[in-house]
Amino acid sequence: MTELHGSRVVLRPLRAGDRPLLSRWLSDRELRRYVTRGRAFSPEAPDSEEFLILLGSHPIGVCGLFAIEAKGAEVGIVLGEKDAWGHGYGPEALGLLLRYAHEELGLTELSLYVHAANARAVRAYEKVGFSVERRLVLGRWLLGRGQALLVMRWRAPGEGRT
Ligand SMILES: CC(C)(COP(=O)(O)OP(=O)(O)OC[C@H]1O[C@@H](n2cnc3c(N)ncnc32)[C@H](O)[C@@H]1OP(=O)(O)O)[C@@H](O)C(=O)NCCC(=O)NCCS
């Protein structure tokens, strides 16, 4: 894995030393409401490639590819620093991640789950080319009354539905 450079953010591979920072971010109550991944971001997760998102030298979040298979993977992103929300850093990091997934790993299809109520995240994913494929309304014991999850998918240019 290498560093990925955008116009404002840099993605560098997650390291064991980043663990305290991840714990701090993911222990935040507001942030945890948005996160759909059961498993925490972790430098040693198998079948995954995870990156710290840096603004200059300052870490603002984490993103990655999970359950990587021959052609596909799942995507996740969390900007742990709330000051960083709403400036377009998320889509920029996702754009770098998608290009890496396609050009370096040869992946052609990426998917993710997002709370339907998380409008900012849904919009951020749409901005980099994901579209909503399905809406899941799960038992209300799991998500809460009236809550739904969206399954979103991205396909590499030229890759049709299989
Ligand atoms: C989701 C996240 C990655 C998006 O990154 P970001 O850099 O904040 O995204 P942007 O600044 O590009 O905002 C995305 C879009 O949402 C819109 N938006 C911003 N705040 C919004 C809000 N409160 N409600 C609805 N839309 C909002 C923005 O206007 C923008 O759309 P536009 O460019 O068409 O105007 C980041 O906010 C984050 O990590 N949030 C907390 C964790 C999370 O939700 N992770 C995703 C879990 S699946």
Image: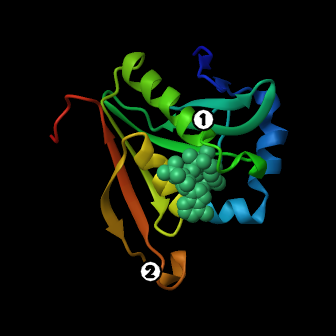
Instruction: Give the CA distance from mark 2 to mark 1.
Output: 29 Å
Which residue is disc 1 drawn over? Answer: 45
Query: Can you say whether 142 is above or below 54 in the image?
Result: below
**Residue 86 versus residue 131: which sits nearer the camera?**
86
Q: Element type at marker 2?
A: loop
Give the quadrant of residue 77.
top right
Nearer the N terminus, badge 2 or badge 1?
1
Q: Element type at marker 1?
A: loop
Is any atom of residue 39 visible in this view?
Answer: no
Give x and y (percent) for residue 71.
30, 29
**Residue 121 versus residue 66: which sits nearer the camera?**
121
Q: Amino acid at mark 2?
A: Gly
Q: Is residue 94 left or right of residue 106?
A: right
Tell me which residue sits at (47%, 56%) in the image: 122
Q: Is residue 87 left or right of residue 82?
A: left
The numbered disc on residue 60 is none
Q: Is residue 74 left or right of residue 51?
A: left
Q: Amino acid at mark 1?
A: Ala
Q: How many marks?
A: 2
Query: Can you say whether 38 is above or below 18 in the image?
Result: below
Which residue is disc 2 drawn over? Answer: 139
Query: Can you say whether 68 is above or below 140 in the image?
Result: above
The label nearer to you, 2 versus 1, is 2
User: Under 8 Å from ligand 1: the CB of mark 2?
Assistant: no
